[in-house]
Image (tube, coloured by chain):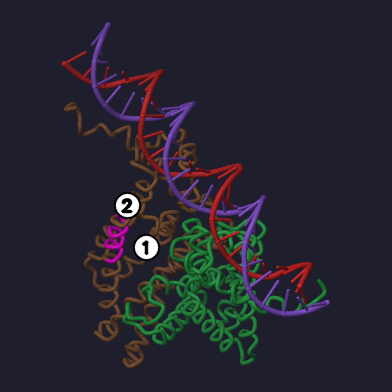
Chain colours: A brown, B green, C purple, D red
DNA sequence: GGCGTAAGTTAACGTTAATTAACGTGGGAT
DNA sequence: ATCCCACGTTAATTAACGTTAACTTACGCC
C-alpha cells in the first residue's frame, strides 16, 4: 500500500485514456443511452464489466468526459485570453482555441452540449459552472475588443452573441463528414475550415457591435 | 368502410397533435431514449400503450416529428426564397423564417439535429434528403446574394458557411432559459433576439463573402 | 517463494422499457 | 335497438442493460 503511490497509474492511465476515447466516440455516434457497456468494453479489447476496474460506472465515464473537456476549455481559454497583446488579440486567441477544439475533439464538442442532461445533478452543476466561467471569459474579452458592446445595455447582446458564435463554431461536426482521417467529405480541408470559422466568428462579433452602436433602444429590455 | 374517408380524423388529429407536442417537449428535455412511453401517455392524459392507437410505436413518433419539421422547413424555405424581390431579399426572408422557427419551435429545432441517430435507416434517409434540399436552397440563394461566393471555387465555403449559420441561429435553445412563457432568463426579449440573430447571420455571410473575394487560393481544396 | 493487488473473466440479479394481448365502453350510423 | 369502431384500460411478454459477485491470472515486492 505504501509502495509507490506516485506512479502506480503509469500503466493504468493509458487504459483509462483508451476507454475515454472509445467511449467518447461511441457516445457521440449513438448517444449515451444508446451505447451499452459491453460495447464500450469490446471497443477497448476487454469485455463488459471489466470497465468497472477503471470507472465507477457508465455515468462516471460520461461525467469524466464532460468535466474534462469543460475544464480544458476554460483553462486553455484563460491561458489564451491572458496573452497580454490587447483585447483584440485575446479574442483572436480565444476563437482560434475554440476552433482547434471543435476540429480536433469533435466527439467531445458534440457531447458537451448534447449529453449534459444524462449527468447526475452534482456533475451537471460542476459542468455548468465551468461552462458559465468560460462564457464569462468570452463575454469580458469580447466587450473589450468591441467597445460598442461594453455599454452596460449591450451586455445581454454580447452574451447572446457569444452563445451564437459557439453554435457557429461547434457546427463543424454537422458540416464535416464522419471521416477523421481525411476531410474528403466536405470540399473544405481542415485549415480552410479553421480560417473560415475564424472569419465567420469575427464577422458575427463585428455585426453585433455594429448593431449595438446603432440602436441602444433595440435591446428590448 | 366507405363512409367518410375524408373527415374521419376530424377528432383524431387534435389528439395526435397533442401527442406530438408533448413528445417533442419530453424528447427535447430528456432525450428520445430517456423518455418512456408511459410518460408521454401521462402527459396527454392517457396511459402508456394507449398511444399505440395513434402511432405505430415510439420510433414512429420521433420519425413523425423529424420528418414533419424537415418538410415544413423546406416548404416554407422554398416559399420565402421565391418571394421574387431579388436574392438579397430572398436571403433575408430565409433567415427570418429560420429564426422564427428556432424561436417558436425550440423543441423541434433541438430534436432536429440531436435525435437523427435514433431513426431507422429509411426515415433517417428521408430526413437527410429533406435537410440536404434545405441546405441547397440556402446555398443557391446565398451565392446569388453575395456574388463573391458565386465563384465555383467558393462553393464549399458557401456550403460550410450555411451550416455554420444554422448552428448560429439554432443556438437559441442554449442561450434562452427553458421558460416558454416569458424570456426572463436571458436579458434579451424575443424580438431583440430575433433581430440580433438576423444581424449575426448577415454578418457571417458578409464575412464569408469578403474572405472569398480576397483570397481564392485559401480554400485549401 | 509466498503475497497482495491490479485487471480481467463469466454468471447472475434486478430493473426497466417497448410492445402485444385481451378486454371494456360509449356514441353515431343503419 | 343494434352494431361497430375509435379509443382506452390493465396484464403479460420479451429483451436489454447496468451493476454486482465470485473466481482467475500475472506480476512487483519483502
Instruction: Compute the Cα span from label 2 to label 1.
Output: 15 Å
Which residue is nearer to you in this view: A92 or B72?
B72
Question: Secondary structure of the magenta portion, mostly?
Answer: helix
Q: Is residue B195 above or below residue B14?
A: below
Q: Which residue is mark 1?
A: A98
Report the quarter where the C terminus of chain A lies: bottom left
Q: Residue A149: x percent and y percent?
A: 29, 82
Magenta stretch holds residue A126: yes
Range of the magenta residues? A123-132
Left or right for B54, reference A110? right
Numbered disc 1: secondary structure: helix
Q: Which residue is mark 2?
A: A68
Chain letter for mark 1, please.
A
Left or right for A207, reference A141? right
| Residue depicted at x 30% and y 68% | A135
Which residue is nearer to you in this view: A65 or B218?
A65
Amino acid at each position: 500500500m505504501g509502495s509507490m503511490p506516485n506512479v502506480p497509474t503509469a500503466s493504468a492511465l493509458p487504459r483509462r485514456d483508451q476507454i475515454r476515447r472509445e467511449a467518447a466516440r461511441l457516445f457521440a455516434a449513438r448517444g449515451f443511452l444508446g451505447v451499452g457497456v459491453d460495447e464500450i468494453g469490446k471497443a477497448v479489447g476487454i469485455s463488459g464489466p471489466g470497465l468497472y476496474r477503471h470507472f465507477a460506472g457508465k455515468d462516471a465515464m460520461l461525467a469524466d468526459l464532460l468535466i474534462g473537456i469543460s475544464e480544458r476549455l476554460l483553462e486553455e481559454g484563460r491561458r489564451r485570453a491572458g496573452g497580454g497583446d490587447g483585447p483584440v488579440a485575446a479574442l483572436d486567441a480565444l476563437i482560434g482555441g475554440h476552433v482547434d477544439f471543435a476540429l480536433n475533439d469533435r466527439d467531445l464538442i458534440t457531447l458537451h452540449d448534447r449529453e449534459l442532461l444524462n449527468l447526475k445533478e452534482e456533475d451537471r452543476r460542476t459542468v455548468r459552472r465551468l461552462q458559465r466561467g468560460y462564457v464569462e471569459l468570452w463575454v469580458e474579452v469580447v466587450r473589450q475588443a468591441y467597445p460598442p458592446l461594453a455599454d452596460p445595455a449591450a451586455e445581454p447582446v454580447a452574451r447572446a452573441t457569444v452563445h451564437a458564435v459557439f453554435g457557429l463554431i461547434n457546427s463543424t461536426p454537422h458540416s464535416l463528414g464522419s471521416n477523421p482521417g481525411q476531410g474528403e467529405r466536405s470540399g473544405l480541408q481542415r485549415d480552410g475550415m479553421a480560417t473560415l470559422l475564424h472569419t465567420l466568428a469575427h464577422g458575427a462579433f463585428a455585426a453585433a457591435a455594429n448593431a449595438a452602436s446603432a440602436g441602444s433602444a433595440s435591446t428590448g429590455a
